[in-house]
Image: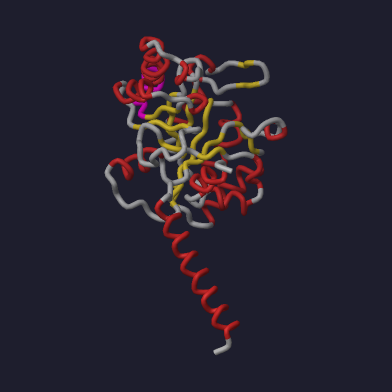
Amino acid sequence: MPKAIKFGLLFLLFSFFSFLIWIGTLLKHYTVPILMYHYVNNEEPLKSRLGVSPESFERQMRFLRERKYNIVSLEELTDLIKNKKKIPPMTVAVTFDDGYLDNYTHAYPVLKKYNIPAAIFVVINRIGKHLVNDDYMSWSQIREISESGLITIGSHSMSHPNLSEISLEEQLKEEILESKKILEKELNQEVKFFSYPFGGRSPEACRIVSLSGYKAAVGTNFPKGSPGDDIYALKRLRISENCRNLFIFWVEVSGFYTHIKEQRDDY
């Protein structure tokens, strides 16, 4: 056999086994994608990475349904992780932060249309208010979506501070525990989930979230290599208008994007 052919075959074998090793490494870092939305309107996507247009949002939700993703509630996902059960392929969860009015006017009708469960985390001191350019859902709107059985309401604190910058225990309890009590009183149901404002958390904040009776907590911007199965620090993916391209959206909901992004950010 000519040397060139031998060399080519060896190169192909090396490439094949390298690919298998890469796939094996990637599979070890699979993390169930928990999607994080903020605004759903036509203005915010032009100003920041915190918004998607109503058209993009509906395309994304239709994509998940038509491709037969296993769309679960945050409670279902938490139970799977906590009980160390095998998580079905293509599992995904949907969440929103801040409780903007457009979550009710634009996102909620789409979620109902495709029967997609979601969690919406609200800031107590902003409910029913207009602040600068932002409108927030009212108590009556929050009650309506909560009673639908499709939407889980969680706490996003009292006033939206970065909890990692707060050292006083009483202030942390005010933001974490008091917000839970108010929501439970207003909605007449247990509030099980918390979202860290700005993704900021500290060991003390996590401890108080746990002691306050929350079932789990979500956030972003966790240190590289943070475990994906810590129910008080569940990682999420920020979804922006960049995902109007469904190929990009598909990559981000693959379950491997968090690891790929962490590796990419090293360079």
Which sits in the foreground, 46 or 108?
46
Residue closest to the far left: 83
Q: Please check the rendered image and state whether residue 191 is part of the magenta-colored stretch, yes or no.
A: yes
Residue closest to the far front: 3
Residue closest to the far bottom: 1
Q: Position of residue 184 (x, y in %)?
A: 37, 21
Q: Check the picture and name the quadrant holding the C terminus.
A: top right
Instruction: Name the image colouring.
Output: secondary structure
Q: Residue at x 57, y 37 (%)?
A: 107
Q: Check the picture and name the quadrant holding the N terminus.
A: bottom right
Please state the total of marks drawn on the protein image.
Answer: 0
Q: Position of residue 68 (x, y in %)?
A: 48, 56
Q: Please check the rendered image and state whether residue 108 is part of the magenta-colored stretch, yes or no.
A: no
Q: Is residue 92 left or right of residue 210?
A: right
Q: Position of residue 94 (x, y in %)?
A: 49, 40
Q: Residue at x 53, y 26 (%)?
A: 99
- Magenta region, residue range: 184-192
Q: Residue at x 35, y 29 (%)?
A: 192
Q: Residue at x 46, y 34 (%)?
A: 223
Q: Is residue 216 left or right of residue 151?
A: left
Which sits in the foreground, 184 or 6?
6
Q: Position of residue 14 (x, y in %)?
A: 50, 70
